Image (tube, rainbow, N blue to C red):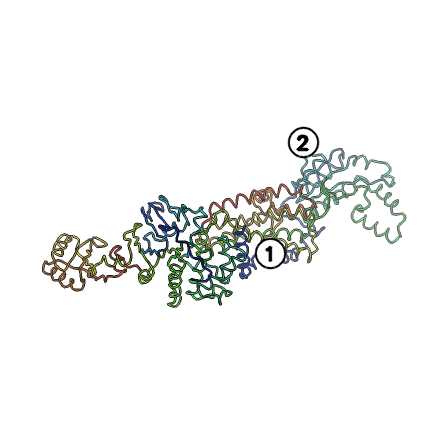
Amino acid sequence: MRVTLAFTIKEFLLLLRDPGGLFVLFLMPVMFMVVFSLALGGLFEEGAARGSARALEVPVATGGAGEVAEQVVEQLDATEGLAIIRERDGQSLTADAVAQLVADGEYPVGVVFPQGLTALLEDPRILRGEQVQPLEVDVIVDPATTAQVTGPLEGALSAVLQQVVGRRLGEAGAAAWFEQVAAGLPAEVREQLSASMQQDGQGEGALPVTTRRRVPPGVEREQFPDQYQQNAAAYTVMGVFFIATVMIESIFRERRSGAMRRLRAAPVGRAPIVISKLAPFYVVNLIQIVIMFAIARLAFGLDLGFIPAVVVVSAALALVATGMGIALAGVARSETQGTGLAVIVVLTTSALGGVMVPRFIMPEAMQQIGNITPQAWAIEAYQDVLVRGQGLGGIWLEAGVLLIFAVVFTAIGVWRFRFD
Amino acid sequence: MLPGMAPVSNADSGALLRAGGVVHRYGDLTAVDDVTVEVQRGEVFGLLGPNGAGKSTLISICSGMFGPTAGQVTVGDRQLSPTSRAAKRRIGVVPQDIALYEKLSGRQNLRFFGRVYGLGGRRLRERVEAVLEVVGLSDRGDDQAGTYSGGMQRRLNLAAGLLHEPELLILDEPTVGVDPQSRNHIFNNVERLNRDQGVTIVYTTHYMEEAERLCDRVAIIDHGKIVALDTPRALIESLGGGVIQIGIDPEQREQVMETLESLASVQAVGPGPDERSLNIEATSARHALVDVMQAMNAAALEVETVRILEPNLESVFLRYTGRSLRD
């Protein structure tokens, strides 16, 4: 313990006198977070519908909704950028199955048509223009998904519903219904609505079928990640991994100076020395994380969710990062090679892990590849807490995977650790 | 007595460091080849050897940095290995490198190494101040080590090895690249540590005058083996009046030896460091040189090179290794 304390004090003193190291560890990730948050703000704004490069796969349940739903789904499937999933393992998707798929993160958004949709539209009351309780088509949304993803679907769904249902109701019935529901409106407003209906075929808000956005069962908060939730998590994770470059410099500097040889002659075992090399950088990592989230909280109003869960994820994340540092230092043959390798590894795994670009807009293959990076698991864990409002029960899997990464990296580091 | 230094007990006399049949190999290369040597408690033991002779490997093994391929090292009654903490605590190591953190102050460096050696609290503070005083750096203790001169860094390097009051101090080339003032300071420290505190010292150096001044006994290591071991005086006296080293045609080797052994001024003719040279020992090398050259000319034997080795430790080294200590 005394040795670990000695190393910790020493490393802090050295780091305080290393402006380059301080920049890499503290200023750079903050800079990334602020700049990318401000620059890409529109990308994460709710309703900012922009198409993604590949088709958005949407699981759909139409059980009992009848031919109207089938027509809507058919037209949605024909819409560019959308791919409708009707079955899973040869079975038609149910409403529960769609909700579960979204809850599991397999798809960012799904659609569930209400039972009796077709029958409702054949209700004579509607054709007579009488008011009935409107039916709702549920758009099941992963709260961690941005409007960039859901916007096109919701827009297309509304348009197709308007088209199919409007046609179904018939111009006469719709006009009668319009007169009924708009009777109490001022003349000026009625004219505007009428003109709008003539232009668009049918006023969207006037349909007896509406869409309703819902989150899957078990996910409490319906909230999209804004740019700060995305970038605070992502750039905190990336910044933490840059500890590897500082660790490599520290270890090689100690080797070069001969201090490692002196330590080797000291009455301290190999494992305590390696662990003592990890400990101060682990603390530095935790400080980094606190600073990053403090800035995100104070400057951008980020809601940190369940703090103990954030602490658990951060503790596991810092273990992985320091483990990666010691492993890379063990693998590298020189300081230049080591720092270069660290930069490449950190940037590559960060990109694959969803730091620069959220993983859910990556192609499926890239998303799968991303799973081999600790960054992906760490970001997912943070977003479980920050965006989905989950507690310790929601992050145990990610935290467990991070610990496995940490054990593997540290084992490689201890195995390959050289004193000279 | 140096401030803050407790004398080492002389109750347990005899060898403090023992290396028995030590072998160390790097792949196919045998760096240390069956070395057996004892360092007596309270002596200053010099280890001399050219680069690549195995000196650094032997020093590393005797410091507990790594274990030998074969054989064993003991400190007192404890076997030394990389994991033997008790044995390691008895040793202070001053590496050849300036094994310090340049961005830390002298005191911060010493506090760090003190903690690594198990010191803490008031005891640590006292020891840091004591060793700073020993090496004459008390007034510069708060300056960053990187701002020190080479000599001051060497002195701080020495101080770090003294923090835990070791019985055995291993100094690996402690005066390389230092100014005369710092070198004298280090000499004085070594002498006082040994004389006043009874600290046993193993000292490696490239400088013969240091070995002659400081060491009670000197071992010369070459090709991984101890090739000579005695007091400096005895080693020098073994040269007699000096040695003439001549370079010859290897094909004339037998004839040359026969010719020279017949000379009255020559005491002995032996092999040189290689097959192209011979060592000629004489009561007076300078006087014998005339006889040697005349005899070689008379016998029409070729002399390629001539070198007179004055009776000093440098010549002893050259005689045994064929190389200058600074090669």
**Horizontal side, residue B315 vs residue A390: left or right:** left
| Picture coordinates of residue A51, whole percent (x, y) | 66, 48
Residue type marked 1: Pro
Position of residue A157 measured from the top left corner of the image (x, y, whole percent):
73, 43
The number of callouts visible is 2
Q: Residues within 10 Å of mark 2 (few under 14, many from 20)?
A: few
Q: In this view, which residue lies farthest toward the right?
A: A184
Q: Are marks 1 and 2 on the same chain?
A: yes
Q: Camera-side residue: B202 or B50?
A: B202
Label 2: state its secondary structure.
Answer: strand
Amino acid at dot 2:
Gln
Numbered disc in front, either 1 or 2: 1
Q: Dot 1: few (<14), some (14–19), or many (≥20) neighbours within 10 Å?
A: many
Q: Name the one closer to the observer, A394 or B87.
A: B87
Q: Is residue A185 visible?
A: yes
Q: Is residue B247 above or below residue A315?
A: below
Query: Can you say whether B60 is above or below B265 in the image?
Result: above
Residue A347 makes an appearance in the image:
no
- Residue B50 location, quadrant: bottom left
The residue positioned farthest toward the front in the image shown: B11
Q: Which residue is tagged 1?
A: A29
Q: Chain of mark 1?
A: A
Where does residue A28 sit, x and y in percent of width and height? Answer: 58, 58
Residue A91, labelled with which disc? 2
Quadrant assignment, res B159 = bottom left
Quadrant for the N terminus of chain B, please.
Answer: bottom left
Q: Chain of mark 2?
A: A
Closer to the N terminus: mark 1 or mark 2?
A: 1
Give A163 or A215, whichever is nearer the viewer: A215
SS of the residue under disc 1: helix
